[in-house]
Amino acid sequence: MPQHKVRILLIGPVNSGKSRLANFLCDLEACLPEDIRPTQGLRILEHELSDVEIGGQKYEVDVQLWDTSGDEMYSSYWPVFRKNTDGVVFVYSQEDDYGVRKLDLMYNYFVTQPNLSPRACLACAMQSDEVYAKLSSTFSKVSKIVVNLDAQGEKVKQDFAKYVASIINTMSNK
Ligand SMILES: Nc1nc2c(ncn2[C@@H]2O[C@H](COP(=O)(O)OP(=O)(O)OP(=O)(O)O)[C@@H](O)[C@H]2O)c(=O)[nH]1
Ligand SMILES: [Mg+2]
């Protein structure tokens, strides 16, 4: 099977669920409770997706996830996070109005400035009971999904595979 490689950045406010989503996508959910803690700057996780359909053909894709910290303490790392990334996933909670308002600034830095296509982006609202905050019009061209890891994990994996296919399409149309 032909192969592709993509590097995807996970960004968003502190405690929005970036590491939880990354663990889930890489089948690391069963980690010990003491492993769950704020990310110290950056974690890099790798996994392989098979049977990703791109233009009618199936590919195997090596996915490298850059799971970043949302803490402003690490904002001096942003130039490193942004360099050579193929896609950007925004992870947020619709219960966190303060966090959602920070996403516009992140979009500007990680997507608008390096001229990345909105098709290489995905906005993931982690499932919440209440909805206090919505994305601004800055995200109008970005695909949006609601992530419910407890009840609809399989759907999250399918949505993610579609997103990976869309990144590769964007890369090959450059
Ligand atoms: N079930 C489960 N919950 C997790 C896991 N990892 C984190 N959590 C929980 O999910 C919530 C969000 O935590 P994280 O995913 O670590 O948040 P984050 O966006 O990575 O935060 P920063 O790294 O500080 O920017 C917290 O309540 C964690 O306790 C996991 O692997 N499994
Ligand atoms: Mg984290």
Image (tube, grey):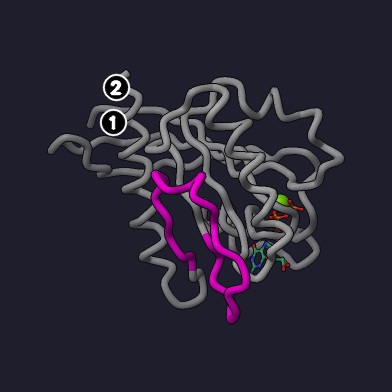
The amino acid type found where label 1 is placed reads Asn
Considering only vertical position in the picture, is 93 above or below 86? below
Choose between 109 and 149: the one closer to the eye.
109
- Where does the image place residue 78, in percent across and percent down from the top left? 72, 29
Residue 131 part of the magenta-drawn span: yes
Q: Quadrant of residue 35?
A: bottom right
Q: Horizontally, is 148 left or right of 58 in the view?
A: right
Choose between 116 and 32: the one closer to the eye.
116
Instruction: Please state the extent of the stretch shown in magenta in the rendering.
Output: 125-147
Residue 110 part of the magenta-drawn span: no
- Where does the image place residue 40, in percent across and percent down from the top left? 81, 43
Extreme-top residue of the structure: 174
Residue at 59 percent across and 32 percent down: it is: 110
Residues under numbered marks 2 and 1 in contact, where contact means CB atoms less than 8 Å apart: yes
Q: Horizontally, is 75 left or right of 55 in the view?
A: right
* Quadrant containing the N terminus in the rendered view: top left
* Quadrant containing the C terminus in the rendered view: top left
Return the residue at label 2. 172
The amino acid type found where label 2 is placed reads Ser
Q: Horizontally, is 85 left or right of 100 in the view?
A: left
Residue at 42 percent across and 37 percent down: it is: 118
Choose between 74 and 58: the one closer to the eye.
74
